[in-house]
Image: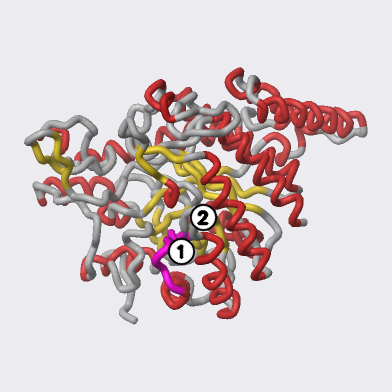
């Protein structure tokens, strides 16, 4: 294998990259990014690796969740509400499932999206597809769809401001368990899952009061007042990722400082391709999406490429098989990795394999299909004696109507009421908390 540097990916085929119209503009943006402070630090990434090692060992559970594609226009309230839903889900999984939960957001960098077609046609007009706001815009004009390298700098600045806000919320008292009832906004409280959540919150509140009465001061227990919250995104735009890669002064290792965790997508996971080549050399914890066409041999090759030293917590395999395929396709993959001795985290992405187009033309996902894939994921692990380590879902804290089903019974006719995503449909807050209780029940019954 060739010696790795942050730029060796440039000698490989890089799929799903924009056709930047101005190389000089791109070079200038990369140089400016290279001079910016890191968004995250190497020690934080190492901390996440150690927490994921516990997941790989069956001692914790991974919740990775957030937007399909982040918007540059996300408000502070929207970011807070998204974090709130993730914290609600984590509390449900911890309390009802009985395990520590590692919390990783699809946030502060999930600005790029691969598309099945490089172009989009409306009427007689054909333009480049929308590739996420880090590249171009949603509007259908030539200027809006032109890839603009200055957007790489905007993405950095938006990620930095989002990270600052997340750190303030998770360290400044918002995540304090004594405030758990304040997270239960009306649109969750009025749902069946919200009622169950409120009951659980009251039980936690009583437990905290009991601890205080026993002389255990919650103000002095960081785990009660603060949470570890990590960021992640798909490492799709390699120019951006390389520009934010730094050499750690303590260890001499390279880290991609755009996020704590990076993953390679189903469309770009080719061993020998540019994306795997880039990621194999950074020491961040990594993920790889695993779709229905992957073979056991493919998965072992991915493990050998991205985690040849078999470091626990280094690699998460994120399966996206589809509800109809998971019970058949997943067991051979689990068996192959188990028998190889690779210490991976297995997580289920129940969203991407279950997308369909409703009669009104909206892309959607049915809550029952999402739940069925997770159920099949747990069943496959039970069959093979392996650990169902986590879930990877697309959600928002906003009261959207993008996925059908769930406790509120959203149907296809209701999709147009609040369909706000820039790309793929997301679970809303009610559906997300509902899903967390159902996954917690699966965890509880397993143990």
Q: In the image as oriented, which residue stretches furthest toward the left?
A: 124
Secondary structure at badge 1 equals: loop
**SS at mark 2?**
helix
Q: Residues within 10 Å of mark 1 (few under 14, many from 20)?
A: many
Query: Residue 167, percent across and down?
Result: 53, 36
- Image height check: is 89 above or below 234? above
Residue 392, magenta (yes or no): no
Label 2 CA crowd tier, 10 Å (few <14, some 14–19, many 20+): many
Quick one: 189 or 167, which is closer to the camera? 189
Q: Quadrant of residue 227?
A: top right
Question: What span is in magenta?
Answer: 282-295
Left or right, residue 401 beside residue 275:
right
Q: Which residue is mark 2?
A: 45
Q: Is residue 16 above or below residue 410?
A: below
* Residue that appears at 41% across and 49% down: 233
> CB under 8 Å between callouts 1 and 2?
yes
Residue at the extreme top:
186
- Please give the name of the residue rendered at 64% of the width and 20% of the height, measured from the top-left corner: 190
Instruction: Based on the picture, tell me whether residue 284 belongs to the magenta stretch.
Output: yes
Query: Where the N terminus falls, by quadrant?
Result: bottom left
Q: Residue furthest front?
A: 359
Position of residue 368 measured from the top left corner of the image (x, y, whole percent): 55, 42
Q: Is residue 158 left or right of residue 430?
A: left
| Magenta-drawn stretch, dominant element (helix, strand or loop) | loop
| Residue 104 at least partly seen | no
Give the label on residue 283, or none: 1
Residue at 59 percent across and 53 percent down: it is 390
The vertical placement of 330 against 51, above or below, is: below
């Amino acid at each position: 294998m060739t010696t790795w540097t942050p730029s060796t990916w440039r000698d490989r085929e890089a799929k799903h990259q924009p056709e930047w119209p101005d190389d000089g503009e791109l070079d200038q943006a990369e140089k400016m990014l290279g001079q910016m402070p890191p968004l995250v630090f190497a020690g934080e990434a190492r901390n996440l690796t150690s927490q994921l090692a516990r997941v790989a060992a069956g001692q914790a559970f991974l919740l990775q969740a957030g937007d399909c594609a982040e918007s540059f226009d996300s408000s502070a309230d929207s970011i807070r509400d998204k974090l709130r839903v993730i914290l609600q889900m984590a509390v449900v999984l911890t309390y009802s499932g009985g395990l520590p939960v590692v919390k990783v957001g699809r946030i502060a960098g999930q600005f790029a999206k691969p598309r099945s077609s490089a172009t989009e046609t409306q009427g007689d007009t054909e333009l480049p597809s929308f590739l996420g706001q880090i590249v171009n815009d949603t509007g259908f004009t030539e200027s809006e769809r032109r890839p603009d390298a200055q957007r790489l700098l905007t993405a950095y600045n938006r990620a930095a401001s989002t990270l600052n806000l997340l750190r303030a919320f998770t360290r400044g008292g918002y995540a304090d368990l004594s405030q758990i009832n304040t997270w239960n906004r009306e649109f969750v409280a009025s749902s069946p899952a919200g009622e169950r959540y409120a009951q659980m919150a009251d039980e936690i509140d009583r437990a905290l009061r009991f601890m205080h009465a026993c002389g255990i001061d919650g103000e002095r227990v960081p785990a009660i007042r603060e949470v570890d919250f990590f960021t992640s995104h798909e490492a799709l735009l390699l120019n951006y990722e390389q520009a934010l890669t730094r050499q750690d002064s303590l260890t001499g290792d390279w880290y991609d400082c755009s996020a704590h965790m990076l993953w390679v997508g189903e469309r770009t996971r080719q061993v020998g391709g540019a994306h795997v080549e880039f990621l194999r050399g950074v020491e961040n914890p990594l993920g790889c999406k695993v779709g229905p066409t992957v073979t056991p041999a493919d998965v072992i090759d991915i493990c050998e490429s991205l985690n040849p030293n078999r470091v626990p917590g280094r690699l998460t395999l994120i399966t996206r098989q589809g509800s109809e395929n998971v019970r058949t396709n997943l067991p051979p993959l689990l068996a192959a990795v188990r028998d190889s001795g690779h210490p991976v985290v297995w997580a289920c992405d129940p969203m991407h394999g279950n997308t369909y187009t409703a009669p009104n033309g909206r892309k959607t996902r049915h809550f029952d299909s999402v739940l069925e894939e997770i159920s099949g994921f747990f069943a496959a692990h039970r069959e093979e004696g392996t650990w169902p380590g986590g879930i990877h879902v697309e959600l928002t804290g906003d009261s959207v109507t993008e996925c059908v089903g769930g406790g509120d019974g959203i149907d296809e006719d209701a999709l147009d009421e609040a369909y706000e995503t820039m790309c793929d449909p997301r679970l809303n807050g009610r559906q997300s908390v509902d899903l967390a209780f159902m996954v917690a029940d699966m965890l509880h019954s397993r143990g």
